[in-house]
Image (cartoon, rainbow, N blue to C red):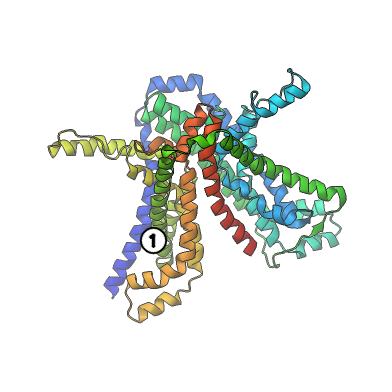
């Protein structure tokens, strides 16, 4: 028994260490890529693009960070503490923009607000040909689009924090003579600061990882530069080096978020969460609150979906052919395989955390979950650079040694490479629901089964799997939808003939064909509503 117990502990530790190694592999590759530098390419980048890339990235970080805080916190405050017409349905409806990928909202905004778009054309008919709106293809247009897509991160976390504060503290502030506005700044915001910081960090990391939206706006960032360097200069190594610079921005964002969390005071939440509003708005103020929430929802979700439907019914429906069903098949196949693989590994990690709760295992699992912070383009170039080295130094020579007629790379551009990128990037997405489900399983249940002589596999299939099933389904759904919407990794790494809906949207929007892009875009929006519905139901229960 002691030998068996030691072997079992070693297996769980090995699972955690291997998962951490998967995340470390692309990070180490990025560092080793600097051993050789193409001075011609880097000279061109430094002279023509680097300062613009850094400036654009800093503008996006500052603009999106400030925008999601302003929009997310204000909406969370209104829907969680104030009573106004439409509050109960706006409370959950404001999470619907989660279902719209950033690159979908981007091409809808450009199609609607560009100089030749329907809105400006209508305004010129009304006010004359000299009428102009500010150009949508600008820094402000990119920031506005990304804020409308990513504000739900801050909204959802801030709303939960405000609701968890209960009635007692805010009522105590009113008794002490504080106005609602003073109570907001001096009580509610300090207590909700950790949640707001976490939501802002998520929005900034998604901004740094975005490729589709910035490419629609022709706005140069590190993600677009990585793509152009790989496919324009045909230099995977230079693209890998650019990816390491993008990763530096990601780590700086993570560091800033941890520092903010560390400096934030932790307040005990002993009060019961509120279910009803604390302030009842009346008259024009109430309708102003309703109008503000409805305006954000309309711009971020209702109008874009309506425009996609209009484009689809006008001429986009013509693309509903065998080619489209092939795209659907490829997309669903990739999503299904990636979800099954990622959830399977995540189950092993949560069990390793339960059965081997030592510091080394916890640290390895935390590192394995860091993959979600890595942009898809960074993962793509890191994995492909490593696989290119393996193909050239190991696989192709081995094929020649075995006497194969036409030695060829096997790993570079393979389906395995793409699935590995999905596994690393979305491990944390699957781990969260599974960890929550496992926390509800009392250790006494599997211990009782083992005391009755049941083997580890029997305990796993008869105890853990049935009780973890809700978490397994939630995790699989979240990973499945994230894989469907993932653009950079899929675009850079897909095998030949494995185009997906996201890749199709990119190819059509690159040509400015918004109408034909409406069909795959609407499909992704409808599928993206599934995890949003799950979030809304959980929010309603809690």
Residue at the spot x=56%, y=50% of the render? 529
Residue 350 percent coordinates (x, y): 43, 62
Corner quadrant of residue 381:
top left
Corner quadrant of residue 144:
top right
Q: Is residue 449 above or below residue 496?
A: below
Q: Is residue 312 above or below residue 464?
A: above
Judged from this view, the residue extending furthest toward the top is 130
Numbered marks: total? 1
Q: Quadrant of the C terminus?
A: bottom right
Q: Nearer the viewer, residue 193 or 263?
A: 193
Residue 495 percent coordinates (x, y): 35, 38
Residue 45 percent coordinates (x, y): 46, 22
Q: Nearer the viewer, residue 480 or 330?
A: 330
Residue at the spot x=37%, y=24% of the render? 38
Say whether residue 30 is visible. no
Residue at the spot x=28%, y=76% of the render? 1
Q: Nearer the viewer, residue 517 or 503?
A: 517
- Position of residue 220 in the picture relative to residue 286 (left or right): left
Q: Nearer the viewer, residue 495 or 127?
A: 127
Q: Is residue 3 above or below residue 485?
A: below
Corner quadrant of residue 390:
top left
Residue at the spot x=46%, y=65% of the render? 469
Say whether residue 499 is visible. yes
Judged from this view, the residue extending furthest toward the left is 403
Residue 271 percent coordinates (x, y): 71, 67
Q: Which residue is tagged 1?
A: 348
Give the SS element for disc 1: helix
């Amino acid at each position: 028994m002691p030998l068996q117990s030691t072997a079992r502990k070693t297996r769980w530790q090995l699972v955690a260490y291997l998962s951490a190694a998967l995340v470390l592999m692309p990070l180490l590759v990025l560092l080793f890529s600097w051993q050789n530098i193409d001075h011609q390419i880097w000279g061109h980048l430094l002279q023509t693009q680097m300062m613009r890339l850094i400036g654009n990235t800093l503008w996006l970080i500052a603009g999106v960070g400030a925008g999601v805080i302003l929009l997310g916190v204000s909406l969370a405050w209104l829907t969680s503490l104030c009573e106004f017409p439409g509050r109960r349905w706006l409370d959950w409806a404001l999470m619907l923009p989660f279902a719209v990928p950033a690159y979908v909202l981007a091409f809808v905004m450009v199609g609607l607000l560009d100089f030749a778009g329907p809105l400006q054309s209508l305004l010129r008919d009304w006010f004359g040909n000299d009428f102009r709106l500010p150009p949508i293809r600008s820094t402000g247009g990119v920031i506005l689009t990304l804020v409308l897509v990513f504000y739900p991160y801050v909204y959802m976390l801030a709303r939960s924090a405000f609701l968890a504060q209960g009635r007692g503290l805010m009522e105590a502030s009113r008794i002490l003579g504080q106005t609602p506005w003073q109570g907001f700044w001096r009580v509610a915001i300090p207590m909700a600061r950790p949640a707001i910081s976490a939501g802002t960090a998520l929005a900034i990391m998604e901004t740094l990882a975005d490729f589709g939206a910035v490419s629609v706006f022709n706005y140069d960032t590190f993600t677009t530069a990585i793509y152009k360097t790989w496919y324009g200069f045909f230099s995977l190594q230079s693209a890998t080096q650019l990816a390491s610079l993008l990763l530096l921005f990601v780590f700086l964002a993570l560091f800033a978020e941890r520092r903010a969390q560390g400096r934030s005071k932790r307040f005990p939440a002993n009060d019961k969460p509120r279910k009803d509003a604390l302030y009842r708005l009346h008259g024009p103020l109430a309708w102003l609150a309703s109008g503000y929430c409805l305006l954000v929802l309309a711009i971020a979700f209702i109008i874009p979906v309506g425009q996609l439907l209009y484009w689809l019914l006008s001429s986009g429906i013509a693309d509903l052919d065998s080619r489209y069903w092939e795209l659907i098949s490829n997309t669903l196949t990739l999503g299904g395989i990636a979800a099954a693989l990622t959830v399977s590994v995540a189950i092993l990690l949560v069990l390793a955390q339960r059965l081997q709760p030592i510091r080394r295992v916890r640290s390895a699992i935390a590192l394995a979950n860091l993959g979600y912070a890595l942009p898809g383009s960074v993962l793509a170039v890191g994995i492909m650079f490593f696989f290119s080295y393996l193909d050239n130094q190991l696989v192709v020579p081995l094929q020649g040694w075995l006497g194969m007629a036409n030695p060829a790379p096997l790993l570079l551009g393979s389906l395995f490479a793409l699935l590995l990128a999905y596994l690393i990037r979305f491990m944390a997405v699957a781990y969260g629901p599974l960890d929550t489900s496992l926390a509800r399983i009392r250790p006494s249940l599997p211990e009782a089964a083992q005391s009755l002589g049941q083997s580890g596999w029997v305990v796993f299939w008869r105890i853990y799997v049935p009780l973890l099933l809700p978490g397994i389904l939630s995790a699989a759904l979240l990973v499945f939808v994230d894989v469907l919407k993932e653009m950079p990794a899929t675009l850079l790494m897909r095998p030949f003939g494995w185009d997906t809906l996201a890749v199709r949207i990119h190819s059509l929007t690159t040509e400015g064909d918004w109408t034909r892009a409406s069909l795959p875009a609407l499909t992704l929006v409808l599928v993206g509503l599934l995890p949003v519905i799950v979030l809304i139901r959980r929010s309603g229960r809690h």
